[in-house]
Amino acid sequence: MAVAPTSIAIEMQFSGAAGAWTNVWADVRAQVPVGCSYGIQSGGGPGDRCAQPGALTFALDNSAKNSNTAQGYYAPGHANQRSGFDIGIGCRLAIIYAGTTYYKFVGRVAAISVTPNQRGPWTTLVTAHDYLDECLRAKLKRVAVQTSKRGDQVFDVLVAAMPSAPGSSTSGTGRETYDLSLDAKSSEEGVLVLGELQRLAMSEAGFIYGKGTTNASTAQALIYESRTERAKKNTNATTFDDDDLDGIEITRSRDTVINRMQVKTHPRRKDGSAVVLYQQRDATVGTGSALSLSAGVTQTLICPYTDPDDRTHRCAGTSMVTPASSTDYSANAAADASSTDLTSSLGVAATFGGTNASVALTNNHASTTLYVTKLNLRGIGIYDDQETVHEAEDTASQTTFGAHTFTYDAPYQMSPTVGDSMALHFLGVYSDAQQSAESITILMNKNAGLMTAGLAREVGDRIGVGEAMSAIDEGYFIQSVHLTITPTSIIRCRWGLSPASRITYWFLGTAGASNVGTSTRIGF
């Protein structure tokens, strides 16, 4: 029996982040279906661990037929522009069905494209991105190197370091404790937060993604999964068969067979005592160029840490030492330190991060220009000099399917034992040909069960899929969600999938997960 949601709302915050949400669904143009996508959209391979930024796209009526009967209502800069309508404002998709509100997307408007045709169609295309886009744009700003922290604890540090918080965040207990983390170097100052989330997910072999919720105050939730959390899900939340499916994408390809697995781990080298990790100027040894400061002036420097044996090689640092007068910095009335010593007039305030420091230099002298003739920053250097590659291969698979090598980088892993275990595990999972559903599509309006499932099932949920022609009948984990909605409330949902068999570990005494070698594989 055909069903429809009670209501659909695209809501925007025209009065700022703390303001009310206003529904603009009445102005959504029918010519352009609403599109909503989020999750791990790259697939279900061994390296598909961290979600990419999600998007909500829709078109608004910019003609005189909109809710305000004002042409230009959704054109920033127009005389009739709707107050507050601009990039950066909050935007969310909410669908109500059977008494429950499902917040499927929450983000910010990223782009507005006004159709510049005086004869029509007077349409404004809007694109909003979710919280993962903010992680893609934000760089870590002097976050300390983390020592002896589990993956979930590192995840919490990254979320706390963001300029704004997600609607909510959840982190399952990580399986690994990393001796060192958040020590990545970059050719530019600051590593992208999304890049660090990817490094963290790869090191754990877990998953990081956003998903919708039924709570306005916690949508859209940012999730950290340890590598064993999905393995504990042995039952399907919903099962779909031929009658339920509006479409299914099935593959059996050599490209998914991996029979030579290489896993990179990164043993670190660490100094035994403090060394000079930054050196701006030392007039006594003739290096660097002197920085001049006029009286009363403050200048802030970003100081990247480098290997004292090779200043072209970036490194990380911990246990940084507060700069001491004369020992770490000095000032003089002359650039070559040949005149009056003005070190006592130089104020130095350092804010240390894991890979660089921000140093504010102030000339406190009443009238004289000074030159900074020495500025050193000391600490314990951390060096990711070289990687170790752990390899496992299946020669029988290579003979049958041809050789296919996959290289997996686990940046925070220092243990060779874990590296070996990862290589063996991934080889066991991917060395044989698999016929699987890459995605399924349902028409949610077909019946109440499909409408509820399309709204309730989220990234990380386990579902069952049965399709007679391809003889598929197994469990899958949802990797991504894609909704297409028409203004007449017709909703199609496509889920990107990964077979549950790829994450079936052996848990002693756990029903459905204790038949090692039969229904499960050795985990790590």
Image (cartoon, rainbow, N blue to C red):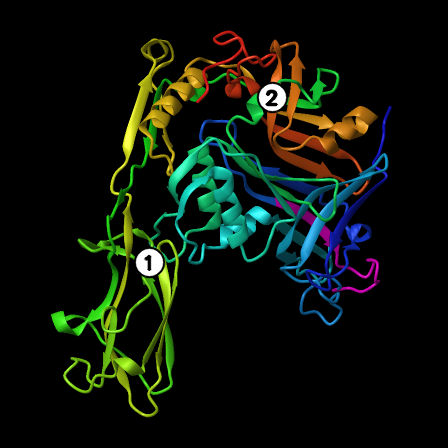
Instruction: Give how far apart the Cα atoms at labels 2 and 1 are.
Output: 48 Å
Q: Is residue 332 visible?
A: yes
498 vs 82, left or right, is left
Give the answer, above or below, for where 510 lies relative to 91: above
Q: Position of residue 10 (x, y in %)?
A: 75, 49
Q: Please, what is the three-letter code of the amino acid marked with disc 2?
A: Tyr
User: What secondary structure is marked by label 2?
Assistant: strand
Q: Residues within 10 Å of mark 2 (few under 14, many from 20)?
A: many
Q: Quadrant of the C terminus?
A: top left
* In front: label 2 or label 1: 1
Residue at 19% in and 84% down: 334
Q: Is 30 within the magenta?
A: no
Q: Is residue 498 visible?
A: no
Quarter of the rendering containing residue 386: top left
Q: Kindly identify which residue carries mark 2.
A: 476
* 211, 84: nearer the viewer: 211
Q: Please, what is the three-letter code of the amino acid marked with disc 1?
A: Met
Q: Position of residue 14 (x, y in %)?
A: 73, 62
Give the answer, above or below, for where 505 lies relative to 91: above
User: What secondary structure is marked by label 1?
Assistant: loop
> Residues in magenta?
55-72
Give the answer, above or below, for where 471 lies relative to 452: above
First in residue order: circle 2 vs circle 1: 1
Q: Kindly identify which residue carries mark 1.
A: 320
Q: Residues within 10 Å of mark 1 (few under 14, many from 20)?
A: many
Residue at 87% in and 23% down: 1
Instruction: Give the residue at the far left of this rendering.
Output: 285
Q: Position of residue 483 (x, y in %)?
A: 69, 36
Q: Position of residue 111 (x, y in %)?
A: 61, 56
Numbered disc total: 2
Q: Is 62 within the magenta?
A: yes
